[in-house]
Amino acid sequence: MAGVEVRRTEDGFEAVNDRGARVAIGAPDEAGVFSPVELLLAALGGCELVTVEPLTAQRGHRMVRLAATVSAEKVASNRLGTITLAYDVELPEGDEKAAEVLAAVAHRVHDRYCTVGTALREPTTVEQVLPAVS
């Protein structure tokens, strides 16, 4: 089971995982923090890249640079439009097959292996549990 704790701090909010990593969360116009939507976009980009990188490297095609920009327009106050994940890659010099391998792996990861992408494309139940009020 995956999970994080999100809590209020003296400076705002943060997400903490069970390994102790922390991410500051705040409003979209607040400096030095990620907004919740930015974290969602980062999760998608991170999911794809951390899956693509070892799979291409295992096939002998380690990219010199592997990055992505993930963006989406808000189409309503509580709704995103299409999310676009644009790869920024520098291929290894002299590796004639690297582009082909990258494309094949990236498509498979996007379509089948990225849990975050699947959760965004397919219906996922989100339950809210509130404490009992006495």
Image: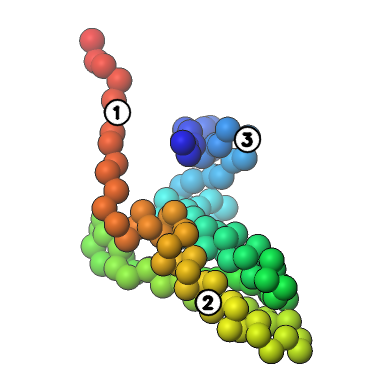
**Spatial CA span between label 3 and label 1:** 24 Å
Query: Residue at image x 49%, y 55%?
Result: 43
* Residue 107 image offset from top left, x and y in percent: 47, 73
Q: Are marks 2 and 1 in contact (CB under 8 Å)?
A: no
Q: Residue 104: which numbered mark, if any?
A: 2
Q: Is residue 115 visible?
A: yes
Between disc 3 and disc 1, whose residue precedes? 3
Neighbourhood count class around disc 2 (C-alpha, 10 Å): few under 14, some 14–19, many 20 upward: few
Instruction: Spot the residue most to the right.
Output: 94
**Spatial CA span between label 2 and label 3:** 33 Å
Query: Residue at label 1?
Result: 129
Look at the numbered disc 2 and give the secondary structure of its residue. helix
Q: Nearer the viewer, residue 15 or 84?
A: 84
Neighbourhood count class around disc 3 (C-alpha, 10 Å): few under 14, some 14–19, many 20 upward: few
Q: Nearer the viewer, residue 112 or 85?
A: 112
Residue 82 in the image: above or below residue 8:
below
Between disc 2 and disc 3, whose residue precedes? 3
Query: Residue at image x 70%, y 75%?
Result: 61
Query: Residue at image x 63%, y 35%?
Result: 20
Q: Is residue 98 left or right of residue 6?
A: right
Query: Residue at label 3?
Result: 19
Kind of residue at badge 3 = Arg
Query: Residue at image x 49%, y 65%?
Result: 109
* Residue 36 image offset from top left, x and y in percent: 42, 51
Kind of residue at badge 2 = Ala
Look at the numbered disc 1 and give the secondary structure of its residue. loop
